[in-house]
Image (cartoon, coloured by chain):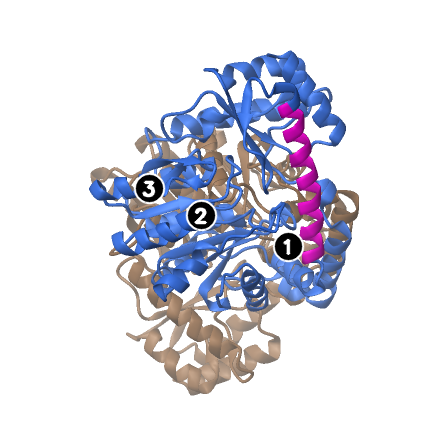
Chain colours: A brown, B blue
Amino acid sequence: MATEGLLSQRMARLKSSAIRELLKHSKMDHVISLAGGIPSDALFDFEGLNQATQRAITEQPKNAFQYGLTEGSDTLRVRIAELCALRGVKTHADDMVVTAGSQQALDLVMRSLIDPNDVVVVERPTYLAALQTLELAEARVMSVASDKDGMVVDELETLLHTQRIKAVYLVPNFGNPSGVVLNEARRRQLITLADRYGFVIIEDDPYGELRFTDERNPTLFQLGQEMLGHNDAVIYTSTFSKILAPGLRLGWAILPQWLLHKVATIKQAADLHASSLSQTIAEYYLASGRLPTQIDKIREAYKHKGELLGSLIEQELGDVIAFNKPKGGMFLWARFREPFNTTQWLEKTLEQGVVFVPGEFFFPERPDYATLRFSFATATDEQMHEAVARLKRAL
Amino acid sequence: MATEGLLSQRMARLKSSAIRELLKHSKMDHVISLAGGIPSDALFDFEGLNQATQRAITEQPKNAFQYGLTEGSDTLRVRIAELCALRGVKTHADDMVVTAGSQQALDLVMRSLIDPNDVVVVERPTYLAALQTLELAEARVMSVASDKDGMVVDELETLLHTQRIKAVYLVPNFGNPSGVVLNEARRRQLITLADRYGFVIIEDDPYGELRFTDERNPTLFQLGQEMLGHNDAVIYTSTFSKILAPGLRLGWAILPQWLLHKVATIKQAADLHASSLSQTIAEYYLASGRLPTQIDKIREAYKHKGELLGSLIEQELGDVIAFNKPKGGMFLWARFREPFNTTQWLEKTLEQGVVFVPGEFFFPERPDYATLRFSFATATDEQMHEAVARLKRAL
């Protein structure tokens, strides 16, 4: 459908031009980027990817280059179900659709689930590209605040007293941009509310594996199963982009029976199926057993980077900027202690040669201009030291 | 958006179950399939694909596995512009979006172009999956007949006297399922009408290279440029699926300036970008210079298969079935001379061990039950002899 005049159109434009600007500047040698939401390709398991690719094109060339099933290859879906089981997501190959990254999983879910003006509640701040899919589906987006323990579910409960909602979208683990984790009590409360008020939870989990501690919460999917005795209340989406390689464009959605066929039908119209080559490579990669080691490697590297960035900011900028230490993922979300506009500040930091993403772009409404998102995934230690020094000079 | 109750929902269901049934039976050893719309993987250039893949993952591993640009890689878009130039489509890398096959190109175009209830005119019969994208965009689909020279543009002109339309969708070269080519006079007439009545033409061209003769018509895109002096009236979509490998999921859309940004914005929300790995492989494959030879090989093989199937049907079933000899592409579209229901007949041919696609599924309205589509792309010579003998026995 056409997209004029809807909620986040303005933000999409802003983001689009801002990101373009940032990327343009990020490519300049002297600019250090703490802006991008991309994983570090210095950590990619090129050896394992290479081996898996060799096997895909020599052992299964026809499968790798021919059309495939809309819902994804049988073998890959079995492997993904195994991977999900390790996360406490007990599912079956038949309950999922393989997608072009979790971005497509979100788009397909919104297209199949949302009728125009259906209310979808998101966290404030939230993942911007999810808002774009909600806008395309003509959802009416409402938001509740998020704090250091994730979405403030009490606020959602208050909203539910007067407002019928269709779905809640959230990233419960190390969200983009907030980096926080939804605590277990709130997870349970959310499941109870979903059951009582008849909405569906869209649990978007690209970063769950990338935790820096052994602390681990049950997934909403698992709690839904345990507390309600069925899988109808939670849609679980995830991706290989942050744990393997985003260039493969592979993600997945675990879907309740009542939505599965509709999502598959729209997937067929959208692009027939995900890349057969990428799927065959992922099959062999998962079969190789290298993924757990690779995830450990990424966790360790990001933990170091996240801690370093945190300590540098605390040391150099701690009197003006507050933040929670990241416990996983790729992002450090910060907030100026005094009223401040980080979008305007970006011009100054650009002059000094460092970029981030201003926080306002992640708010569906009531933007907090004092916030900003740093990514620590791609910068080297040296670059982080230099970046924080430059940020300080830009104050 | 939700999809209940719309025009082709019934057809999608029918098709879905029919195709599932067919696929199930096609997998049984004794059943010969003339049903699938897939290219012959016996003709894939595995050597060239293998070489291109090796170069992609060894020379550009980071580009192949990392996130990329929404509109597609710069290099690939330049290569595609060169490929288009050979087809008479003079374009520029900046005027295109690389997509997950032409299926996604159609979905993105419909999502960005169509407001609910906008009228889109298609051929009767037409490509079914295009109807699915139109349904998702909530278009009001109207149709005009097609004959041996393609869409009957006179009929469209009559319609335009009383009906405002937003777009015309057609496959002008060796269309699926009809196999016919829109002749040049009608192409020119269509461009004139687009200009006079202010609609846009969606020229879907997956099969244009697969012609069996040297006869070649200018593309609608080219005629639009020449006759109108601008690129605003024609959207051109195509794919690597029929000339290289569908499993890569790579296609493209050449877009007028007034639509380009909107398509790219929706592409970003839909799946961020096409597989980086597939794009890097396609770059190296195109650079290798093997594509023209590969296209010649496919043309020659399909020409032989198309002629063989034609002559067998003429010989064995010519008294009951009429058809036009295919001049390109992958399909032979046929029609029983007397009133007949090919959907019902499919049950009998299945018993004999041969399947096709009943024609009714390709009609957005007023289905012609006496029609059917044969694909000659994948069956061997022996299988085609046997298939036609079985069809005869099923009469």
Which residue corresponds to mark 2? B106
Real-space Cα separation, disc 2 to disc 3, in angstroms: 25 Å
Rendered view: B271 above or below B231 = above
Label 3 resides on the chain identified as B
User: Which residue is more in the foreground, A108 or A184?
Assistant: A108
User: Which residue is more in the foreground, A52 or B212?
Assistant: B212
Magenta span includes B307: yes
Which residue corresponds to mark 1? A244
> Where does residue A58 sit, x and y in percent of width and height?
79, 47
Q: Callout 3: 10 Å neighbours few (<14), some, many (20+)?
A: some
Rendered view: B381 above or below B339 = below
Q: Which residues are magenta?
A: B291-314
- Quadrant location of the C terminus of chain B in the rendered image: top right
Q: Residue at x 61, y 67 (%)?
A: A304
Real-space Cα separation, disc 2 to disc 1, in angstroms: 30 Å
Q: Residue at x 43, y 76 (%)?
A: A318
Q: Residue at x 70, y 45 (%)?
A: B300
Which numbered marker is on residue A4?
none
Which residue corresponds to mark 3? B154
Label 1 resides on the chain identified as A
Real-space Cα separation, disc 1 to disc 3, in angstroms: 55 Å
User: Which residue is more in the foreground, B159 or A165?
Assistant: B159
User: Which residue is more in the foreground, B355 or A249?
Assistant: B355
Q: Callout 1: 10 Å neighbours few (<14), some, many (20+)?
A: many
Quadrant in the rendering for residue B259: bottom left
User: Disc 2 or disc 3, which is closer to the eye?
Assistant: 3
> Where does residue B293 sit, x and y in percent of width and height?
71, 55
Q: Is residue B57 visible?
A: yes
